Image (tube, rainbow, N blue to C red):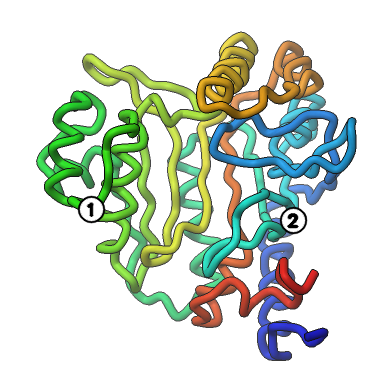
Amino acid sequence: MWTPNTDHKIRIKRAQMLQAIRLFFYVKEVLEVETPALSQAANTDPFIDSIKCDSTRYLHTSPEYPMKRLLAAGSGDIYQICKVWRASESGTKHNPEFTLLEWYRVGFSYQQLMKEVSDLLLELTPALEKPTKFVSYAQLFLEKFSINPHISCKEDLIRCVNQEIPSLDTHDLNQQALLDALLTHCIEPELDPDCLTFVFDYPASQSALAQLRKEESYFVAERFEVYLGNLELGNGYQEETDAKRNREILESENQTRIALGLDSLPLDQLFLEACDSGIPISSGVAIGLDRVLMGITGEKSIQKVINFPWDKA
């Protein structure tokens, strides 16, 4: 049918949400910017599928790389609200085309950014009366399974998964996939439904472009994810500014893609040139606004808060 999936109340709520976000950043003197939706490069993350438009361009999965180029050019604090695209993502929590809020704060620690994210989300979802919770990734696993995810061996994780999720075949799962299974199947469903929860300090294997910090005999990734109940809203990093490591990460992701039987993808050389030029110490975060709108309205499906989702686009 040609009709939208939303009613007019939802459309008003979306407009109010966008207005509130822009006012929030206006007061804080964070500059709104725009960057291209089409890129010569693709996202090399093996678990995110870019949509290819033609022989030279991909729809972006995030404005991260061009926004970091702006940081390298001296933009200072910036934010962007834009459409992004990820193939093969559809369901009650996913739509291949969705609205993303991404922002970067120069000189901020990721702890400072978590506080700012909490401030914004509490403004947008005033019905939440419980205080925000902040808990480390390790604390969640220690409390639930009595294991330290940063040092547990693969065999221990397999035993834990077999005990907690007996229906899951662990034969082809690596260490990260085992941790992900325990997080999504056993921990996320038990997060407090009536408040925001920030999970921080992830295993080094899940660092993406976040900085690493030495803890005793292991490293942790200085990144966080924020949830409303068990609904993940977004993730943030203490941004990696070392040019060599950023290049190594993207190249390593391409190697992982090849090992998984996926195509190797072109690296964003312009982003890497910006890294060589120098990205300032900063923290950044990306928030899925359609999911935030689900939290504001109480809708259980993302398809109900997007006027024309993928099957009607």
Q: Earlier in the sequence, mark 2 or mark 1?
A: 2
> What type is the residue that disc 2 sits on?
Ile
Q: Residue 267: name its quadrant.
A: top right
Residue behind mark 2: 81
Residue behind mark 1: 167
For label 1, count other residues whose C-alpha is less than 10 Å away and answer few (under 14), some (14-19) or many (20+). Answer: few
Asked if residue 241 can be seen in this view, the reply is: no
User: Which of these two is toward me, 112 or 215?
Assistant: 215
At 79% from the left and 87% from the top, the residue drawn is 3
User: Which of these two is toward me, 117 or 269?
Assistant: 269
User: Which of these two is toward me, 242 or 53?
Assistant: 53
At 24% from the left and 55% from the top, the residue drawn is 186
Q: Residue 16: name its quadrant.
A: bottom right
Viewport quadrant of the N terminus: bottom right
Q: Position of residue 131 (x, y in %)?
A: 34, 66
- Image side of residue 241 versus residue 194, left or right: right
> What type is the residue that disc 1 sits on?
Ser
Q: Is residue 2 above or below residue 187?
A: below
For label 2, count other residues whose C-alpha is less than 10 Å away and answer few (under 14), some (14-19) or many (20+). Answer: many
Kindly state the secondary structure of the residue where label 1 is placed: loop
Kindly state the secondary structure of the residue where label 2 is placed: strand
Q: Residue 250: name its quadrant.
A: top right
User: Which of these two is toward me, 188 or 21?
Assistant: 188
Mark 2 vs mark 1: give the one in front. Answer: 1
